[in-house]
């Protein structure tokens, strides 16, 4: 299996903001991708390749042009106002109920209007890392379009929380949605299977009204887990998209047996849809010792996860999402890929 990876992600380092006394959930950090890359190489799962460059066309098929433009200039606008040594840009207010949208205002107004949570800082290097992640996922998609059975997009920052016109949840652009749309634009029928602990709210929103791209998510119930306001079982799609969105929320403390039952239900739904390519939002924060999650999946279970996905017998694109136990992350990610290859 080819793995696509860009070192540009190293420039996006939220942990560095502690130097400014800025309290951030510094778990989405560069070492995550580095540990995974090292494990893929150590276990000889396949070559690690640099991505090709793609233009903005595939991004704009999924995302609002205003959001894309803002993400590209936010750091410059922020430092122009607050100085080169300013901490990372984060919103301080949102246009909540009864307030007006501020997307045509200053950088503070735009931050509050485009961000839906305060956990996704923009700093020097954020846009370059985000843009490189798109090249990574599209290069992996292109490998599959050209005949590879599978590919792994080692994308960082992650993407599945980013909606068509909002960012948040450590995500700026929705890598897997961009790839799914790219497949559709190239005459294929994609299905997205999200196995991250957190619901892929951005991916759901992007495809919620459409029958041509199926979305299924197995995740922690949003009644107690982020993103809190989307991912419930009664969300089935609307209009032409009704019936093409399947959420399988699970209780706190879910172990492999419970997770596997939901996973098999999701895989059956994917089979019924009849795709010719599967895209997996590969979140590893379901792990028993993940610091920000509450499932009980063990390391060996990730081999089974890969085997379950392989049973679909379809070209498969794995896209790296969450997972924050740095010590275990490389091992359990590689277990999924190895399980898939063996399956």
Image (spheres, rainbow, N blue to C red):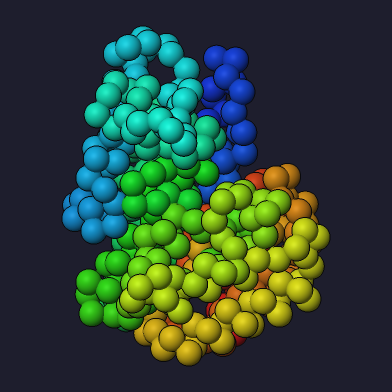
Q: Is residue 81 above or below residue 225?
A: above
Q: Is residue 38 above or below residue 191?
A: above
| Horizontal relation, residue 55 to residue 36: left or right | left
Of residues 14 and 217, the one drawn nearer to the viewer in this rendering: 217
Q: Is residue 216 above or below residue 178?
A: below
Q: Is residue 259 above or below residue 63?
A: below
Count of numbered marks: 0
Of residues 79 and 252, the one drawn nearer to the viewer in this rendering: 252
User: In this view of the protein, can residue 222 be seen by the observer?
Assistant: yes
Provide residue 66's location: percent of width, then percent of height. 24, 40
Of residues 76 and 6, the one drawn nearer to the viewer in this rendering: 76
User: In this view of the protein, can residue 6 be seen by the observer?
Assistant: no
Query: Can you tell which quarter of the image residue 126 is in?
Result: top left
Instruction: Name the residue: 68% across, 69% down.
Output: 302
Provide residue 236's location: percent of width, then percent of height. 49, 72
Instruction: Name the residue: 70% across, 45% down.
Output: 292
Query: Can you tell which quarter of the image residue 123 is in?
Result: top left
Provide residue 267's location: percent of width, then percent of height. 56, 82
Instruction: Name the residue: 40% across, 66% down.
Output: 208
| Horizontal relation, residue 334 to residue 253: left or right | left
**Image quarter in which the C terminus is found:** bottom right
Provide residue 180's location: percent of width, then percent of height. 35, 68
Instruction: Name the residue: 27% across, 24% down.
Output: 105
């Amino acid at each position: 299996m080819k793995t696509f990876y860009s070192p540009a992600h190293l420039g996006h380092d939220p942990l560095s903001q502690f130097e400014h006394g800025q309290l951030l959930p510094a778990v989405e950090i560069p070492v995550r991708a580095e540990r995974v890359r090292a494990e893929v190489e150590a276990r000889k799962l396949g070559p690690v390749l640099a991505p090709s460059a793609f233009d903005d066309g595939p991004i704009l098929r999924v995302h609002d042009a205003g959001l894309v433009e803002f993400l590209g200039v936010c750091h410059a606008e922020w430092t122009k106002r607050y100085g080169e040594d300013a901490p990372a840009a984060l919103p301080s207010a949102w246009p909540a109920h009864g307030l007006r949208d501020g997307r045509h205002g200053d950088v503070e107004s735009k931050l509050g209007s485009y961000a839906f949570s305060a956990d996704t800082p923009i700093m020097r290097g954020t846009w370059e890392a985000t843009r490189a992640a798109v090249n990574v996922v599209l290069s992996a998609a292109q490998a599959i379009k050209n005949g590879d059975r599978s590919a792994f997009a080692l994308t960082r920052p992650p993407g599945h929380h980013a909606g068509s016109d909002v960012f948040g949840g450590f995500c700026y652009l929705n890598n897997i949605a961009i790839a799914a749309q790219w497949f559709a634009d190239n005459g294929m029928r994609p299905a997205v299977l999200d196995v991250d602990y957190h619901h892929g709210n951005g991916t759901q929103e992007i495809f919620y009204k459409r029958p041509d791209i199926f979305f299924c998510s197995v995740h922690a119930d949003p009644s107690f887990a982020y993103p809190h306001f989307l991912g419930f079982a009664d969300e089935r799609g609307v209009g032409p998209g009704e019936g093409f969105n399947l959420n399988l929320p699970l209780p706190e403390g879910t172990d492999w047996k419970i997770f596997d039952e939901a996973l098999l239900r999701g895989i059956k739904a994917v089979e019924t849809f009849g795709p010719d390519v599967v895209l997996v939002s590969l979140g590893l924060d379901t792990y028993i010792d993940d610091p920000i999650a509450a499932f009980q999946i063990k390391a060996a279970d990730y081999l089974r996860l890969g085997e379950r996905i392989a049973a679909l017998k379809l070209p498969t694109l794995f896209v790296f999402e969450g997972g924050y136990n740095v010590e275990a992350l490389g091992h359990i990610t590689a277990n999924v890929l190895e399980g898939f290859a063996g399956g």
